[in-house]
Amino acid sequence: MKDEQVGISKGDLSDLLRTVITETRKPIVDEAAVAAKERHRQRLRDQQAENDAKQAAKERACSHLREDGTCRIAWHKNSDGVWRGVCQLCQGWFEPGKPDYARMLKIPTRSASVVG
């Protein structure tokens, strides 16, 4: 049996090569890896939501005051001229627009006997 020659036009060959090149450039998608990555991301989102809820509860339960009535918030003036602070017990942030910001800003951070 003699080898048969099959003819193909230049246009068909060009289309075939274009298709082959396009298909080989497509990324290989590992469905298991994609699903695992999404499960990991969901676990991270769930953990962050849980951490946020715990922090919010911690902040609500904190008076932000020491036993002597002084403020536990460490205040600092930012480059924009706004005072912001963090409670040294619950790690809650205080900045304009947050509840109790104005009230807590007025409470001294040290007792009068320490200041002198």
Image (cartoon, helix red, strand yellow):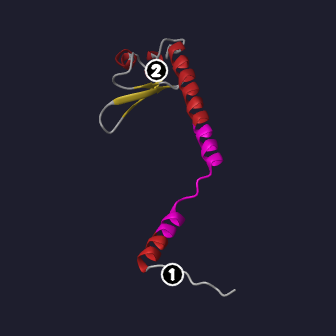
Task: Tell me the amino acid under the disc marked 2.
Answer: Arg
- Quadrant in the rendering for residue 5: bottom right
Magenta residue span? 19-41
Q: Residue furthest front?
A: 1
**Is residue 25 located in the magenta-colored stretch of the structure?**
yes
Task: Tell me the amino acid under the disc marked 1.
Answer: Gly
Q: CA distance from mark 2 to mark 1?
A: 94 Å
Task: Give the labeled residue for mark 2.
Answer: 110
Rendered location of residue 53, percent (x, y): 54, 21
The image quadrant where one finds the C terminus is top left
Q: Nearer the viewer, residue 20 or 95?
A: 20
Q: Nearer the viewer, residue 115 or 73?
A: 73
Q: Comparing marks 2 and 1, which lies closer to the viewer? A: 1
Residue 111 in the figure: left or right of residue 105: right
Q: Secondary structure at mark 1?
A: loop
Q: Residue furthest right?
A: 1
Q: Nearer the viewer, residue 31 or 79?
A: 31
The structure residue drawn at horizontal position 48% and vertical position 79%, both measured from the top left corner, is 8
Task: Give the labeled residue for mark 1.
Answer: 7
Q: How would you classify the magenta stretch by its main secondary structure?
A: helix
**Is residue 113 located in the magenta-colored stretch of the structure?**
no
